[in-house]
Image: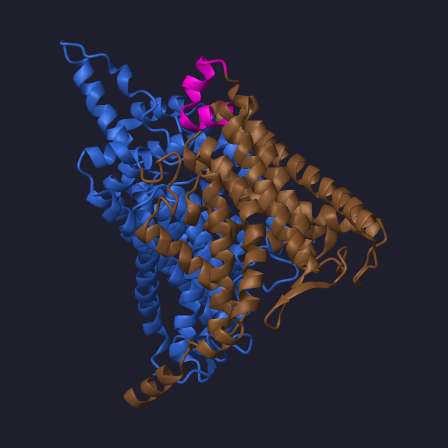
Chain colours: A brown, B blue
Amino acid sequence: MLHELATASSESWISFNWDSLFSNFLPATRDGITYGGIYALVAVGYTLVYGVLNLINFAHSEVFISGAYAVVFTLTGLGFDGNSPNLGTIPLIGDLLVALLAGAVTSAVVAVLVERIAYRPLRARGAPRLAFLITAIGVSFAIQYLIFLWRGSVAEPSVRMVPVKAIFQIGDTLIFLNQIIIVVAALAMMIAVDQFVRRTRTGRGIRAVAQDPDTATLMGVSTERIIVLTFAIGGLLAGAAGLFYIMQVPSGAIYNGGFVLGIKAFAAAVLGGIGNIRGALLGGFLLGLIGNYGQYLLGDAQWNDVVCFVVLLLVLMVRPEGILGSSLAKVRA
Amino acid sequence: MSMGKDPLGGVHAEQQEDNAQAAEDQPRSGGVLGGVRRWWAGLERWQQWILLAVFLVLVLLLPVINPPIISTPDTDFSIACFNMARFALAALGLNVVVGQAGLLDLGYVGFFAIGCYVAALWTSPDSSYVHIPYLFTLPLAMVVTAFFGILLGVPTLRLRGDYLAIVTLGFGEIIRLLANIVPALKGNTGFQNIGMPPGTRDGKPLFENGTAWYMLTVLIIVAVMLLLGNLERSRVGRAWIAIREDEDAAETMGVPTFKYKLWAFAIGAAIGGLSGALFAGQVGFINNQRFDVPTSMLFLAAVVLGGSGNKFGAIIGGAIVSYVPDRFTGIADYKYLIFGVVLVVLMIFRPQGLLPARNHLLAAIRRLRDWVGSAPSGTPSTAATGATSVSLGKEKDR
C-alpha cells in the first residue's frame, strides 16, 4: 500500500520548465506589460472605490466586461470583424475614439447605476460592512447572469479594429501595433487620473472624503457627489480597459470574462498598495509580468491565474500594505 | 436533538415575557413567523422535543411520501431531496463563517470540491491511492478541508474581512483550475465509481438510490447541529459573536480574534468538505466541471436568505436554494440571476433573512439588566433594548 502511495505521489503535479521561461522571456515580457496596462486600469477602479468607501466593489469586474461588450457591439456596428482591417491612421484613430467612448460611457453608467441601486440604500441605513460585501457579490452575479441570459454562454465573435501589424522587433520578438497603443494609452490615462486626483479641486475632494468623510462633509465637500464621481471615474477607466482587452483578446467578450480579470486587477491593486493610484499602475504591470512568466515556467496558460492568486496571498502575508503602501494606512484594522 | 435550544426555540416557557418583548424589538419578525415563534416558546420543553421528533421523522420520510405538489417534475424526487440536504449541510457550515463569526467566505465551493476529491481519491478505482471504506472518507474529508481552511485563513484572517472575501473568491476559482491542470486530479476525465456506504436490501446496494443518501445526510445534519449548538454556547461561540459585532472591541477586551476567526473558518470549511464528500458518494462520478464558482454564491444566498446566524434558517435557506430550481424547472436557468438579486434585495430590505438570529448571550445579559433594574435602586433598563437584533440588521457605523 505504501508503495502505491509512493508511485502516486511521484506523479509530479508541478514542474518547473526553466528552458521554456528563458526561450520565451521576451514574448512573456511583452504580453505581461500589455496585460499589465489592462490590469492597472481596472485596478484603479478598485483602488478609488476602496480608498473612498473602504469597500471592495465586486461588481467592478462586471463594470469592466460590460464595457468590453459595448466595444464589441460598437465595432461590429462599424463593420469590423475578425479579420485584420486595412485602415489609414486617421480613420483608425477615429474608430478607436468612438469605441473608447462607447466602452467608457457604458462602464461608467453601469458603475454609477450599481452605486445608486445597490450601495446607496445601504449607506443611507448605515449598514455594517458585511452587508456591503454581500450586496456587492450579489450585484456582481446578477449582472453576470443578466449578460448570460441575454448573450448566452458563448463569447461574442471576435472583432479586430487595429491592423495586425508588427511595428518593430526585439530579437525575434515582434511588437505589435495594438500592444503599443494599449501600453501608451493606459500609461497616459493612469497619469491623467493621478494628476486629476492630486491637482484638481475635485481631486482634493476625493482625497478628503477618503481620509475622513465626516470632516470632509463639514468642510463643504459633497460626499455623495464625490462617491458617484469615484464610481464614474473607475467605470470610465474600466471601459477603456474593456476596449484594450478586446484589442488584445479579440474574442474576449464572454459573460464571465470579467470575473478572473477582476480578481487579478484587485490583486494588482493590493500588490501596489490599495488606495494608491500609482500603486495600481505599478502593481498592474508587475502582476502582468509575474503571471506571464509563471505561465511559461509552469507550462500552461491556466497557471497564469494561479500564480497571480498566490502572489496575492504572499503579499497579504508579507506586506499587506503593498509595495508603495496604502495611501490611507488603513490596511491593517 | 439540538433544535430544542436553537434560535427558533431558544426561549423557555418561563421567559414568555422576555420573548414577547424580543418580538417587539424586532417588529419585522411579526406576522406568521412571529406567531409561530411565540407559540413555540409557549410550549413546555418536553412538548418541544416530541414535536421535533415527529418533525424529524416526517423530514426523513419526505422522499418516501413524495407529496404530489411538492414533488419535482423533472428530477427524481429522492435526488432532489438529497440535493436539498447537501445544500442545507453546506449552508450550515457557511453559516458558522458568515453568520456566527461575520466573515465573508466566497470560495465555499472550493472546500466543497476538496471534500469531493478526497472521497474520490481514496475510494474510486480510477485513483492509484490507497483505498479505504467510503465512510472513513467523511472524517478524512473534514480534516483535509479544515487544513486547507487554515492554510487559506492564516495569511488573510489577520487582515480586515474584505481581504478574506476576495481571497476566498479567488480560491474557489483556483481549486477549479487546479482540478484542470494537476494530473493526479484527472481533469475532465474525473473519477468514476466512487465508493458508497455498505449495506444491501433485496440484493441491491442500499445506497443506490437517493433516499438512503438523503436520510444519511439528514442524520448528519442533526449531528452537526448538535455539535454546533454546543459550540455556540461555549467560549468559542461567545467569541464569535463578539468578533461579529465589533472586532476591535473584542480584541480590546482580550478575545484572541485571530484564533477564533481561524476556528470558525476551519470548522466551516470542514462542514463544506463533508457536504462535498457526501455529494461525491451519491453522484459516484466527479470531474472538474462540477465546481463552478457561482455555486459559492448560491451557498451564500442560502445562508443570507434563511437568516444569517441562525442554524435553522441556514438549513431552510439551503433547502430553498436547491429546491426552487428543481421544482420550477422553467426558472432553473435564471437561478444565479434570481439569487444574486435576492442577495441585494435582502441586504437592502430584510438583512436578517427569513428567520432572524437570536443572541442568547445578549438576551441573557438583557434579562440580567432588567432584573437589576427592577431592584429598588432602579437602574434604567433601556440600555439593553434591541440587544437581540442580529448584526446584519443592526444600525451601525461602517
Q: Residue at x 29, y 36 (%)?
A: B247
Q: Is residue B129 visible?
A: no
Residue B134: x and y in percent read: 37, 75
Q: Nearer the viewer, residue B276 or A157?
A: A157
Quarter holding the N terminus of chain A?
Answer: bottom left
Look at the magenta stretch and give its main secondary structure. Answer: helix
Quarter holding the C terminus of chain A?
Answer: top left
Residue A45: x and y in percent read: 54, 40
Left of A309 or right of it: where is B266?
left
Left of B206 or right of it: where is A102?
right
How many discs mark residues in the rendered view? 0
Q: Residue furthest right?
A: A79
Left of A244 or right of it: where is B132?
left
Q: Residue at x 49, y 24 (%)?
A: A204
Does residue A163 show up magenta in the picture?
no
Q: Nearer the viewer, residue A218 or A198?
A: A198
Residue A129: x and y in percent read: 42, 35
Q: Residue at x 25, y 24 (%)?
A: B366
Does residue A217 show up magenta in the picture?
yes
Q: Is residue A305 above or below residue A63?
A: below
Residue B308: x and y in percent read: 41, 40
Q: Nearer the viewer, residue A149 or B180?
A: B180
Q: Is residue B154 visible?
A: yes
Q: Is residue B340 above or below residue B217?
A: above
Task: Magenta stretch: give its range.
Answer: A205-220
